[in-house]
Amino acid sequence: MFILHCTDAAGMPVSLRYAPHSSALTNLDGTPVLATRQVAQQPAWEDAVRINPGQPGLKAANPSVLKIQLGLGCNYTCSYCNQSSQVESMAMTRTADAQAFLHDLDKWMEGAPSEIELWGGEPLLYFRKLQVLVPELDRRFPDAEISMVTNGSLLTQEILDFIAFYDIRITVSHDGPGQHLRGEDPFDDPIRSALLMALWRERRAENRMIFSSVLTPANSDPAAIRQWFVNRLDDESVVTSLEGIVATHDDKALAGPGVWSNAQYQRLRESIASSFETGEALRIPALVQKARGFLQSAMEGTPSTSMGQKCGMDRSDHVAVDLHSNVLTCHNTGANAEHGLGSALEMDAIRLTTSTHWSFRECCSHCPVLQLCGGSCMYLEGEQFAQSCENEYQFGMGVLDGALRRALGLKLETIEGDIRRPTRRKMIPIVARQ
Ligand code: SF4
Ligand code: SF4
């Protein structure tokens, strides 16, 4: 149980009680703050499966979400990439393996997935593989939503036609004003820019494309990010979202853009919270989903026991495979080390031993933004987890503050309670002598 100390529009103090495990948000006298849903309308909560290395998760042969990793190669070298530490453990695959993958899919796959995600690396580096896979996946699973995240720098007219023909939902991963942390900006190249704009014009009509950015210390204002795309595309209707806040999957991220100063965290939280007051947050799907999810959980009394991990890869019906049909912890990992869980052809033997559900982490069980976060990355440990958790915590606090501002007109000032944070390494800035 936490006490949320807030101020109202007149600057007067208002305090609320909030229990993230029962999602009870009440006044200090125990009366609910938000209208609670009628019991008849409440969902029947099912307990999430709580995995850890000693209690491994299983994988199903009839996944609802199938993530296909084409390879971890990329033409960019983003400074905070969450895949770069995995590239050496990737099992190499060739275009011919795409055909073998489809052949094997017949042997292990039962039913039809509702979503098929095509992942790199940069998936358009593997266009020849896509030309083998997508037509056949589309034929076998006509009702499945096929989607892809790309950096948008390798488009050609042939690729545009292919995307349109198979109606692939596209997310272009681009950091807008903070793109320099990723590498070149395809908008700076006239030919690439023209193709990206053409893709946008073709896909936007059906809401089949968004731009999505990662929050970093150099790029922490979602409203400014969206405005950058509005200016660049000369289109007020542009939809931009957030992949989330930067995580620290390796030492490079821990030595650079994964680590924020207190002042940077403060700016992040205020820019997110104030974007809910101006209404700008309502145009950014990731912020809307987080805030709506929190408010909905408070109205429905969502128990934390029903919560899996934020990315869903702890679930048995979310399956990531490479083109050798190796089952992976997730699409960001390689099969030739601990994240290779075995062959999809022997799905019953797969054990997800690499990951830890949030409920086994002390900090998550004592966290006021648990319902907004969902436990950060399930396989990170040590300093990489601690820093990623801190980033998620600050992001969650900004959204929590914003949701309270928008829904209740209250500004979150401090939180009182038994908050436990993971221990982080003390970062000491090195200043060169003059
Ligand atoms: S912010 Fe950190 S402690 Fe809180 S739920 Fe997320 S990972 Fe767990
Ligand atoms: S396990 Fe989930 S959060 Fe972690 S890298 Fe994979 S998809 Fe991302």
Image (cartoon, grey):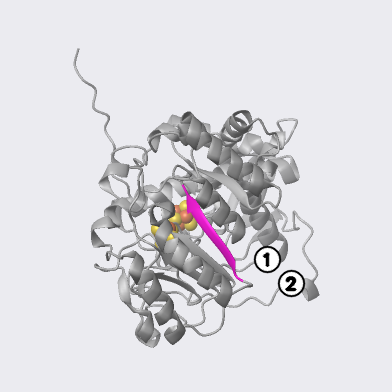
Residue for point 35% across, 45% down: 75
Residue 42 disc label: 2
Q: Residues within 10 Å of mark 1 (few under 14, many from 20)?
A: many
Pinpoint residue 433: horizontal percent, then vertical percent.
Answer: 19, 16
Pinpoint residue 339: horizontal percent, then vertical percent.
Answer: 31, 68
Q: Secondary structure at mark 1?
A: loop
Q: Amino acid at mark 1?
A: Gly
Q: Residues within 10 Å of mark 2 (few under 14, many from 20)?
A: few
Given contact means CB atoms under 8 Å apart, are the residues at marks 2 and 1 in contact? yes
Question: In the picture provided, is 170 more to the left or to the right than 393?
Answer: right
Q: To which residue does mark 1 refer? A: 301
Question: In the picture provided, is 81 more to the left or to the right than 14?
Answer: left
Q: Amino acid at mark 2?
A: Gln
Residue for point 57% across, 53% down: 161
Question: In the picture provided, is 318 more to the left or to the right than 403?
Answer: left
Magenta highlight range: 144-150
Q: Is residue 298 magenta?
A: no
Quarter of the image with the C terminus is top left
Q: Is residue 24 visible?
A: yes
Look at the picture and state if 135 lies above or below 384: below
Q: Is residue 260 visible?
A: no
